[in-house]
Image (tube, grey):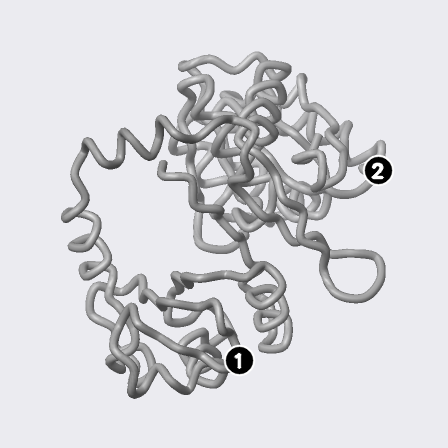
Protein backbone atom coordinates (compact mmCIF):
# COMPACT_ATOMS: atom_id res chain seq x y z
CA UNK A 1 0.00 0.00 0.00
CA UNK A 2 2.80 2.45 0.68
CA UNK A 3 5.00 1.49 -2.25
CA UNK A 4 7.66 -0.67 -0.62
CA UNK A 5 8.99 -3.35 -2.97
CA UNK A 6 8.08 -6.92 -2.07
CA UNK A 7 10.93 -9.38 -2.56
CA UNK A 8 9.77 -13.01 -2.70
CA UNK A 9 12.33 -15.63 -1.65
CA UNK A 10 12.12 -19.34 -2.33
CA UNK A 11 11.70 -20.99 1.11
CA UNK A 12 14.13 -23.72 -0.01
CA UNK A 13 17.00 -21.24 -0.49
CA UNK A 14 20.22 -22.15 1.25
CA UNK A 15 22.25 -19.68 3.27
CA UNK A 16 24.45 -18.42 0.42
CA UNK A 17 21.39 -17.93 -1.81
CA UNK A 18 19.56 -15.97 0.89
CA UNK A 19 22.63 -13.78 1.40
CA UNK A 20 23.00 -13.19 -2.32
CA UNK A 21 19.34 -12.20 -2.83
CA UNK A 22 19.21 -9.91 0.21
CA UNK A 23 22.48 -8.23 -0.78
CA UNK A 24 21.80 -7.93 -4.50
CA UNK A 25 18.29 -6.53 -3.95
CA UNK A 26 19.48 -4.16 -1.18
CA UNK A 27 16.77 -5.52 1.09
CA UNK A 28 16.15 -3.36 4.17
CA UNK A 29 13.53 -5.40 6.07
CA UNK A 30 13.23 -9.18 6.40
CA UNK A 31 9.96 -10.75 7.53
CA UNK A 32 10.39 -14.46 8.23
CA UNK A 33 8.78 -17.50 9.76
CA UNK A 34 11.00 -19.28 12.26
CA UNK A 35 11.27 -22.43 10.16
CA UNK A 36 9.61 -24.42 7.40
CA UNK A 37 10.22 -28.05 6.47
CA UNK A 38 13.99 -28.57 6.61
CA UNK A 39 14.91 -24.88 6.67
CA UNK A 40 15.66 -23.10 9.95
CA UNK A 41 15.32 -19.41 9.08
CA UNK A 42 16.04 -18.18 12.59
CA UNK A 43 19.41 -19.96 12.57
CA UNK A 44 20.14 -18.66 9.06
CA UNK A 45 19.45 -15.07 10.05
CA UNK A 46 21.49 -15.38 13.23
CA UNK A 47 24.39 -16.62 11.12
CA UNK A 48 23.98 -13.87 8.54
CA UNK A 49 23.38 -11.11 11.08
CA UNK A 50 25.13 -11.96 14.38
CA UNK A 51 24.41 -8.36 15.46
CA UNK A 52 20.80 -9.44 16.14
CA UNK A 53 21.86 -10.67 19.57
CA UNK A 54 22.91 -7.25 20.84
CA UNK A 55 21.27 -4.60 18.63
CA UNK A 56 17.93 -3.03 19.41
CA UNK A 57 14.96 -4.20 17.31
CA UNK A 58 14.55 -2.06 14.21
CA UNK A 59 18.01 -0.53 14.58
CA UNK A 60 20.30 -3.20 13.19
CA UNK A 61 23.71 -2.33 11.78
CA UNK A 62 24.87 -5.41 9.91
CA UNK A 63 28.33 -5.78 8.39
CA UNK A 64 27.26 -8.52 5.98
CA UNK A 65 24.01 -6.79 4.97
CA UNK A 66 24.67 -3.05 5.37
CA UNK A 67 21.25 -1.92 4.05
CA UNK A 68 19.30 -4.16 6.45
CA UNK A 69 17.45 -2.24 9.17
CA UNK A 70 14.98 -4.69 10.69
CA UNK A 71 14.18 -8.38 11.07
CA UNK A 72 10.58 -9.29 11.88
CA UNK A 73 9.42 -12.66 13.18
CA UNK A 74 6.01 -13.79 11.95
CA UNK A 75 5.41 -15.39 15.32
CA UNK A 76 3.60 -13.15 17.84
CA UNK A 77 5.90 -14.53 20.50
CA UNK A 78 9.09 -15.99 18.97
CA UNK A 79 9.85 -19.39 20.46
CA UNK A 80 13.39 -20.06 19.35
CA UNK A 81 16.44 -18.51 21.00
CA UNK A 82 17.53 -16.84 17.78
CA UNK A 83 14.19 -15.29 16.90
CA UNK A 84 13.55 -14.12 20.45
CA UNK A 85 16.80 -12.17 20.73
CA UNK A 86 16.39 -8.44 21.22
CA UNK A 87 17.32 -7.47 17.67
CA UNK A 88 14.27 -9.24 16.24
CA UNK A 89 10.95 -7.44 16.14
CA UNK A 90 7.76 -9.40 16.71
CA UNK A 91 4.78 -9.18 14.37
CA UNK A 92 2.84 -7.41 17.14
CA UNK A 93 5.58 -4.81 17.47
CA UNK A 94 5.46 -4.15 13.74
CA UNK A 95 1.70 -3.73 13.89
CA UNK A 96 2.15 -1.35 16.79
CA UNK A 97 4.50 0.80 14.70
CA UNK A 98 2.00 0.79 11.84
CA UNK A 99 -0.75 1.97 14.19
CA UNK A 100 1.28 5.12 14.89
CA UNK A 101 1.01 6.18 11.22
CA UNK A 102 -2.11 8.23 10.53
CA UNK A 103 -4.58 7.38 7.78
CA UNK A 104 -3.85 10.81 6.31
CA UNK A 105 -0.12 10.10 6.07
CA UNK A 106 -0.82 6.76 4.38
CA UNK A 107 -3.22 8.40 1.91
CA UNK A 108 -0.61 11.05 1.08
CA UNK A 109 2.03 8.39 0.44
CA UNK A 110 -0.35 6.41 -1.77
CA UNK A 111 -1.25 9.54 -3.75
CA UNK A 112 2.45 10.10 -4.48
CA UNK A 113 2.82 6.69 -6.17
CA UNK A 114 2.09 5.75 -9.76
CA UNK A 115 1.43 2.42 -11.44
CA UNK A 116 4.66 2.42 -13.44
CA UNK A 117 6.83 2.30 -10.30
CA UNK A 118 8.48 -0.92 -9.17
CA UNK A 119 6.58 -2.91 -6.54
CA UNK A 120 7.95 -6.46 -6.74
CA UNK A 121 11.24 -8.30 -7.29
CA UNK A 122 11.01 -11.90 -8.49
CA UNK A 123 14.11 -14.08 -8.43
CA UNK A 124 14.18 -16.36 -11.46
CA UNK A 125 15.92 -19.71 -11.39
CA UNK A 126 18.34 -18.43 -14.04
CA UNK A 127 20.02 -20.67 -16.57
CA UNK A 128 23.55 -19.72 -15.51
CA UNK A 129 25.12 -18.37 -12.34
CA UNK A 130 23.07 -16.80 -9.59
CA UNK A 131 19.30 -16.16 -9.79
CA UNK A 132 18.28 -13.04 -11.67
CA UNK A 133 16.21 -10.40 -9.88
CA UNK A 134 13.38 -9.30 -12.20
CA UNK A 135 11.86 -5.99 -11.07
CA UNK A 136 8.16 -5.59 -11.86
CA UNK A 137 5.78 -2.64 -11.65
CA UNK A 138 2.25 -2.35 -10.28
CA UNK A 139 1.13 -2.14 -13.91
CA UNK A 140 3.00 -5.35 -14.83
CA UNK A 141 1.66 -7.63 -12.17
CA UNK A 142 -1.89 -6.30 -11.75
CA UNK A 143 -2.61 -6.35 -15.48
CA UNK A 144 -1.01 -9.75 -15.99
CA UNK A 145 -3.06 -11.26 -13.17
CA UNK A 146 -6.20 -9.60 -14.50
CA UNK A 147 -5.75 -10.65 -18.12
CA UNK A 148 -4.86 -14.25 -17.30
CA UNK A 149 -7.99 -14.74 -15.19
CA UNK A 150 -10.08 -12.74 -17.67
CA UNK A 151 -9.03 -15.32 -20.24
CA UNK A 152 -10.23 -18.04 -17.85
CA UNK A 153 -13.63 -16.32 -17.59
CA UNK A 154 -13.29 -15.61 -13.86
CA UNK A 155 -16.00 -13.81 -11.90
CA UNK A 156 -16.95 -13.39 -8.26
CA UNK A 157 -18.59 -16.83 -8.52
CA UNK A 158 -15.26 -18.62 -9.00
CA UNK A 159 -13.16 -20.38 -6.37
CA UNK A 160 -9.54 -21.08 -7.22
CA UNK A 161 -7.42 -23.69 -5.43
CA UNK A 162 -3.77 -22.50 -5.41
CA UNK A 163 -1.24 -25.23 -4.58
CA UNK A 164 1.58 -23.49 -6.48
CA UNK A 165 4.26 -21.43 -4.65
CA UNK A 166 3.61 -17.84 -3.59
CA UNK A 167 7.28 -16.91 -3.98
CA UNK A 168 6.74 -17.15 -7.74
CA UNK A 169 4.48 -15.30 -10.19
CA UNK A 170 2.25 -18.36 -10.71
CA UNK A 171 0.80 -18.18 -7.21
CA UNK A 172 1.31 -14.50 -6.45
CA UNK A 173 0.30 -12.87 -9.75
CA UNK A 174 -1.87 -15.33 -11.66
CA UNK A 175 -3.30 -16.66 -8.39
CA UNK A 176 -3.63 -13.89 -5.82
CA UNK A 177 -3.87 -10.80 -8.03
CA UNK A 178 -5.91 -12.62 -10.65
CA UNK A 179 -8.53 -13.53 -8.05
CA UNK A 180 -8.49 -10.10 -6.41
CA UNK A 181 -9.05 -8.40 -9.79
CA UNK A 182 -12.23 -10.45 -10.37
CA UNK A 183 -13.53 -10.88 -6.83
CA UNK A 184 -12.89 -14.64 -6.96
CA UNK A 185 -11.99 -16.70 -3.89
CA UNK A 186 -8.38 -17.77 -3.22
CA UNK A 187 -8.14 -21.17 -1.53
CA UNK A 188 -4.89 -22.60 -0.16
CA UNK A 189 -4.94 -26.37 0.44
CA UNK A 190 -1.81 -26.33 2.63
CA UNK A 191 1.56 -24.80 3.42
CA UNK A 192 3.23 -27.04 0.85
CA UNK A 193 1.98 -29.19 -2.02
CA UNK A 194 0.12 -32.35 -1.03
CA UNK A 195 -1.91 -34.02 -3.82
CA UNK A 196 -4.39 -35.59 -1.38
CA UNK A 197 -5.02 -32.23 0.30
CA UNK A 198 -5.59 -30.59 -3.10
CA UNK A 199 -8.29 -33.11 -4.04
CA UNK A 200 -9.92 -32.87 -0.62
CA UNK A 201 -9.97 -29.08 -0.86
CA UNK A 202 -11.47 -29.02 -4.36
CA UNK A 203 -14.25 -31.35 -3.19
CA UNK A 204 -14.90 -29.62 0.14
CA UNK A 205 -14.93 -26.07 -1.26
CA UNK A 206 -16.59 -26.99 -4.57
CA UNK A 207 -13.80 -25.16 -6.36
CA UNK A 208 -14.28 -24.11 -9.97
CA UNK A 209 -10.60 -23.72 -10.89
CA UNK A 210 -7.25 -25.31 -10.09
CA UNK A 211 -3.66 -24.30 -10.87
CA UNK A 212 -0.61 -26.52 -11.08
CA UNK A 213 2.51 -27.60 -12.92
CA UNK A 214 2.28 -30.90 -14.85
CA UNK A 215 3.95 -32.93 -12.07
CA UNK A 216 1.30 -31.69 -9.60
CA UNK A 217 -1.56 -32.85 -11.83
CA UNK A 218 0.22 -36.19 -12.39
CA UNK A 219 0.52 -36.62 -8.59
CA UNK A 220 -3.16 -35.76 -8.08
CA UNK A 221 -4.28 -38.25 -10.72
CA UNK A 222 -2.10 -40.89 -9.01
CA UNK A 223 -3.70 -40.54 -5.55
CA UNK A 224 -4.82 -44.11 -4.64
CA UNK A 225 -8.49 -43.26 -4.02
CA UNK A 226 -8.69 -40.58 -6.73
CA UNK A 227 -12.00 -41.92 -8.07
CA UNK A 228 -13.66 -41.31 -4.69
CA UNK A 229 -13.33 -37.52 -4.97
CA UNK A 230 -16.09 -35.41 -6.48
CA UNK A 231 -14.31 -32.92 -8.73
CA UNK A 232 -17.33 -32.12 -10.90
CA UNK A 233 -17.34 -28.48 -9.74
CA UNK A 234 -14.07 -27.82 -11.62
CA UNK A 235 -14.43 -25.85 -14.82
CA UNK A 236 -11.06 -24.34 -15.63
CA UNK A 237 -7.51 -23.77 -14.47
CA UNK A 238 -3.94 -23.44 -15.63
CA UNK A 239 -1.19 -25.95 -16.28
CA UNK A 240 2.15 -24.17 -16.63
CA UNK A 241 5.81 -24.23 -15.68
CA UNK A 242 6.81 -27.08 -18.00
CA UNK A 243 5.62 -28.83 -21.14
CA UNK A 244 2.48 -30.88 -20.55
CA UNK A 245 2.26 -34.45 -21.92
CA UNK A 246 -0.80 -34.89 -24.15
CA UNK A 247 -2.09 -37.90 -22.20
CA UNK A 248 -1.91 -36.00 -18.90
CA UNK A 249 -3.92 -33.14 -20.39
CA UNK A 250 -6.56 -35.59 -21.64
CA UNK A 251 -6.89 -37.13 -18.18
CA UNK A 252 -7.14 -33.73 -16.52
CA UNK A 253 -9.93 -32.76 -18.90
CA UNK A 254 -11.81 -36.03 -18.58
CA UNK A 255 -11.23 -37.20 -15.02
CA UNK A 256 -10.90 -33.81 -13.31
CA UNK A 257 -13.63 -32.12 -15.40
CA UNK A 258 -11.33 -29.24 -16.38
CA UNK A 259 -12.62 -28.90 -19.94
CA UNK A 260 -11.32 -25.33 -20.18
CA UNK A 261 -7.84 -25.93 -18.76
CA UNK A 262 -5.29 -23.54 -20.25
CA UNK A 263 -1.58 -23.70 -20.93
CA UNK A 264 0.36 -20.63 -19.82
CA UNK A 265 4.00 -19.79 -20.47
CA UNK A 266 6.29 -16.80 -20.26
CA UNK A 267 9.23 -15.22 -18.49
CA UNK A 268 9.25 -13.90 -14.95
CA UNK A 269 10.48 -10.63 -16.44
CA UNK A 270 7.13 -10.27 -18.23
CA UNK A 271 5.32 -10.97 -14.96
CA UNK A 272 4.97 -13.67 -16.39
CA UNK A 273 2.45 -14.75 -19.09
In this rendering, position of residue 244 left or right of residue 135 = right
Q: Residue at x 44, y 68 (%)?
A: 68
Q: Is residue 18 above or below residue 50?
A: above
Q: Residue at x 32, y 65 (%)?
A: 72
Residue carrying label 1: 64
Image location of residue 238, percent across then percent down: 65, 29
**Quadrant where the image shows the C terminus:** top right
Q: Secondary structure at mark 2?
A: loop
Q: Residue at x 73, y 42 (%)?
A: 241
Image location of residue 98, percent across then percent down: 21, 49
In this rendering, position of residue 108 left or right of residue 102 = right
Q: Nearer the viewer, residue 201 or 51?
A: 51
Q: Residue at x 84, y 57 (%)?
A: 127
Q: Is residue 76 above or below residue 149?
A: below
Res 247 quadrant in image? top right
- Give residue 245's mark: 2
Q: Secondary structure at mark 1?
A: loop
Image location of residue 158, percent across then percent down: 45, 19
Q: Earlier in the sequence, mark 1 or mark 2?
A: 1
Amino acid sequence: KFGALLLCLNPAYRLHEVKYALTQSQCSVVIAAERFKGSDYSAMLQQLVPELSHHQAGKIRSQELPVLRAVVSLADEPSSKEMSCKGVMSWKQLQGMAAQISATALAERQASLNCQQAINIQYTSGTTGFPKGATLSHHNILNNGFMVTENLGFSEQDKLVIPVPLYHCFGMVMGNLGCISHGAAMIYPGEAFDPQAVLETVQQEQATALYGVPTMFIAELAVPDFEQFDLSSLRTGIMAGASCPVEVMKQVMEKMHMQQVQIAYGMTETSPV
